[in-house]
Image (cartoon, rainbow, N blue to C red):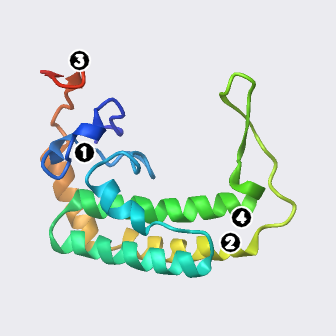
Amino acid sequence: MSGFPYTLPYKRLDLRKLPHLYRPGKGEQGVLMVEPYKSELLPNWKFKDPQSARKSSQRLRIQFDEYLEQGDFIGADMARKFIQMGFTRSRRYANHKGGRKYAVKEDGTRGEQLPRSDVEDPVKAESAQIFKNVLEEIKVDQKYAQLRTEFEKKYANTPIPIFKDEQNPVK
């Protein structure tokens, strides 16, 4: 399938009703864009400390399983992305004090990668491991793999429309 289509007006789209517009992309692409899933999952995404990470990963896993039961690949994939983001953000904070991985240039663009902290933050590292354990479980889930295969077969050749403005796609 093609990469994640960042050009769609996601704020106005309900991808539960328009599943042909979704593309899994790589990693966490689109995790904070795709509605209504973002609004359903984001409130449960926390990684401040191991207790928050444990509660968050459990809630997100429950949502993942519920989406699978409903046959909703997009929902399950978005839950996977939030779990993956819990892992990657926790690792970033474990490795870089304050979570800042890149310097910011004078013009506001991303600069060079900052060096890792001398000492890993053990609290964030534990939070990352909690999310990683759940992520490893769901990545091998047979139902998830089946739904992904079915989704890709159904929509792989469906073109993504180009929107000429916020209202109307170009066909």
Q: Quadrant of residue 59?
A: bottom left
Q: What whole-number distance in Å separates the C-alpha atoms at marks 3 and 4? A: 42 Å
Dot 2 or dot 4: first in sequence order is: 4
Residue 93 numbered mark, or none: none
Dot 3 or dot 1: first in sequence order is: 1
Dot 1 or dot 4: first in sequence order is: 1
Residue 94 numbered mark, or none: 4
Q: What whole-number distance in Å separates the C-alpha atoms at marks 1 and 2? A: 32 Å
Residue 168 appears in the picture as rendered = yes
Q: What residue would you read off at disc 3?
A: 164
Q: What whole-number distance in Å separates the C-alpha atoms at marks 2 and 4? A: 5 Å
Type of residue at label 4?
Ala
Dot 3 or dot 2: first in sequence order is: 2
Dot 4: what SS?
Answer: helix
Q: What residue would you read off at disc 1?
A: 22
Residue 125 numbered mark, or none: 2
Residue depicted at 24% across the width and 20% down the height: 165
Mark 2 in CB contact with mark 4 (< 8 angstroms): yes
